[in-house]
Amino acid sequence: MNTNTQTTRLYHTALSPYCRKVRLVLAEKKIEVELVEERYWEGPPDLKRRNPAGKLPVLRFRGNLLAESQAIVEYLDEAVPAPSLMPQQPLERHEVRRLCAWFDDKFQAEVTRPILNERVWKKITRSGYPDSRIVKDGLRAIKEHMDYLAGLLETRRWLAGNTLSLADFTAAAHFSCLDYISDVDWDRSEALRDWYATIKSRPAFRSVLADQVPGIHPAAHYAELDFG
Amino acid sequence: MNTNTQTTRLYHTALSPYCRKVRLVLAEKKIEVELVEERYWEGPPDLKRRNPAGKLPVLRFRGNLLAESQAIVEYLDEAVPAPSLMPQQPLERHEVRRLCAWFDDKFQAEVTRPILNERVWKKITRSGYPDSRIVKDGLRAIKEHMDYLAGLLETRRWLAGNTLSLADFTAAAHFSCLDYISDVDWDRSEALRDWYATIKSRPAFRSVLADQVPGIHPAAHYAELDFG
């Protein structure tokens, strides 16, 4: 293992939307990164030393340890400005951040966390069987979210406006985790399916599409670029 | 009621750390605001129209509706630059955002939400009696958080560095909610008590210190500026 403190290294876990968001932004900015998979649920001893919050992702970049996914991607957008993933005007920047929070807070609480907890983490940590009621609630909630996003895309090219932004990568990070286990009904909205197909076909998405979680097979269409 | 769309208006609820954070930043920037208290737990019909996420705070500012507290305060700092509440360097800005997320995510989950749920919201919504085990867990967790913050203040004047920032107002928003019901043991750290006494004595804090939640009396020292 390269121990040069200047190596960019991301401590992460595969099906975490927060870790994927940072991976996608690093890749979009063409920053090479060494990925270190952490089994954080086993409480690795160095995790709290690297991030006192005890959470992933943690990014080592230019000799500094950075934590909290939104704080990391905003930092990356300021420290490595090209390509820019934030618009210039304060009101447009607010819309990007509002949608990032929408996914990292509301979508996470209503969709990503309950579905992944039941269908992935319980299996990985051998802590029981999926509760079908919770999964069903999550699959009901995702429909409302998809309808809301489809509504946004009626007047916008990307989620937060007409330029690709952190909001798209945040959303795609969540959807890609759910798509791995085939829990997104892409037939619900053509606009949203086209949006996802477009972002998924970017070179930045390759690393995420190559993920293989031991014991959990990806859906057949997961890594296909034309899934329409 | 003034229906001029240019009136700055904050839809909020009193003991919400997210609403308080926006109130504090508005006041620090000397932006006059009309406060509209929303009983969001009763699902007021206009809440989802103003913010599809169905959450408070919502700020009407210069004719726009803004949501998500962190997105709002970052917007305010960009749209109304003086006094600045963000440092200039990307790494320092990351530290501010990391600590904002620390409070709005970790501190909220481990301390603010469980304690306020049990001791305030159950009373306001008449949905049962406090679970003393949950309150006790919250009071145990706050000690660890206070020790961590006291450690930061050993080398810093303010929480994220040597200048007052959004991190201090985010932290103070959470602490002030808990202080209202007297759930902060300020004897635990002199440095943290001094930090809070300093920020609490700013004119921006006056509105928050004047809050009176019906049926829930503030602690005797809540609005005192010298509580040491």
Image: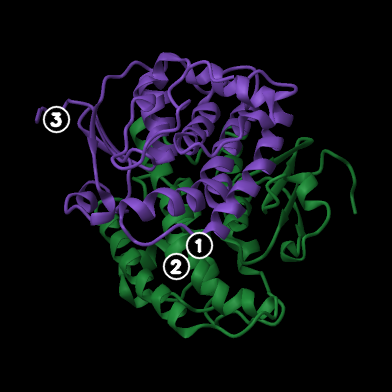
Chain colours: A green, B purple
Quadrant in which residue A216 is drawn: bottom right
**Mark 3 is on which residue type?**
Thr
Q: Is residue A93 above or below residue B111?
A: above
Q: Which residue is mark 3?
A: B5
Residue at 47% across, 85% down: A132
B221 relative to B154 in the view: left or right: left
Comparing marks 3 and 1, which lies closer to the viewer? 3
Residue at 33% across, 38% down: B14
Q: Are marks 2 and 1 in contact (CB under 8 Å)?
A: yes
Q: Is residue B32 above or below residue B143?
A: above
Q: Which residue is mark 1?
A: A174
Q: Position of residue B19 (x, y in %)?
A: 37, 37
Q: Which residue is mark 2?
A: A111
Q: Is residue A27 above or below residue B102?
A: below
Q: Chain of mark 3?
A: B
**Mark 2 is on which residue type?**
Val
Q: Chain of mark 2?
A: A
Residue A157 visible to an observer of this rendering? no
Q: CA distance from mark 3 to mark 1?
A: 36 Å
Q: Position of residue B55 (x, y in %)?
A: 32, 49
